[in-house]
Amino acid sequence: KDGVSTYNILWPSRSSSSAVSFRDNDHWTRGIYSFSVCGPKTLMTWVGGDAASRLEEESDEDVARDCCEVLCRFTGCDDCFVVGMRRTSWGSEEGFGGSYSFIPVGGS
């Protein structure tokens, strides 16, 4: 929507009766915490925790479909589609180990 630069996803607790029904509470999409607008037709999706590792096992087609479904459920849009996608595999890439930044205990 116009003027929005980030959609932060706030999931209800897994035990809440108002929890958004999306497959199951352990599905990787529960790790989505933000969609950031990076250009007129470009979104960056942030996924954290164990969900990021599970995401790496999914096909590009499944990830695109699932991201659209989550975005539509939280924003009310009904015409989300993906033309192309790039994604990282930081959890399995040597040298990253699942993190792009790290502050050791006592380092701040």
Image (spheres, rainbow, N blue to C red):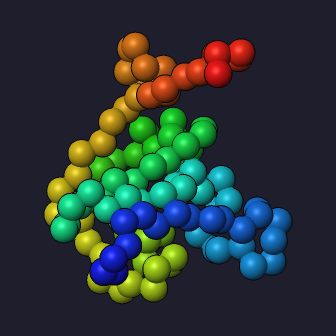
Q: How many marks?
A: 0
Nearest the viewer among 43 and 30 is 43
Quadrant assignment, res 20: bottom right
Q: Residue furthest front?
A: 108
Quadrant assignment, res 19: bottom right
Give me the residue at 30% from left, 80% from top.
Answer: 2
Quarter holding the N terminus?
A: bottom left
Q: Is residue 31 visible?
A: yes
Residue 3's spot in the image, x, y percent?
A: 33, 76
Q: Is residue 61 visible?
A: no
In the rendered image of this protein, does residue 25 appear above or below residue 94?
A: below
Nearest the viewer among 30 and 39 is 39
In the rendered image of this protein, does residue 92 appear above or below residue 80?
A: above
Residue 86 placement, left or right of 31: left
Residue 39's spot in the image, x, y percent?
A: 21, 61
Give me the residue at 43% from left, 71% from top.
Answer: 71
Quadrant assignment, res 87: top left
Residue 5 placement, left or right of 70: left
Residue 3 placement, left or right of 100: left
Residue 40's spot in the image, x, y percent?
A: 19, 68
Give me the residue at 49% from left, 47% from top.
Answer: 47
Residue 27's spot in the image, x, y percent?
A: 59, 55
Give me the residue at 71% from left, 17% from top.
Answer: 105
Quarter holding the C terminus?
A: top right
In the rendered image of this protein, does residue 78 appear above or below residue 90?
A: below
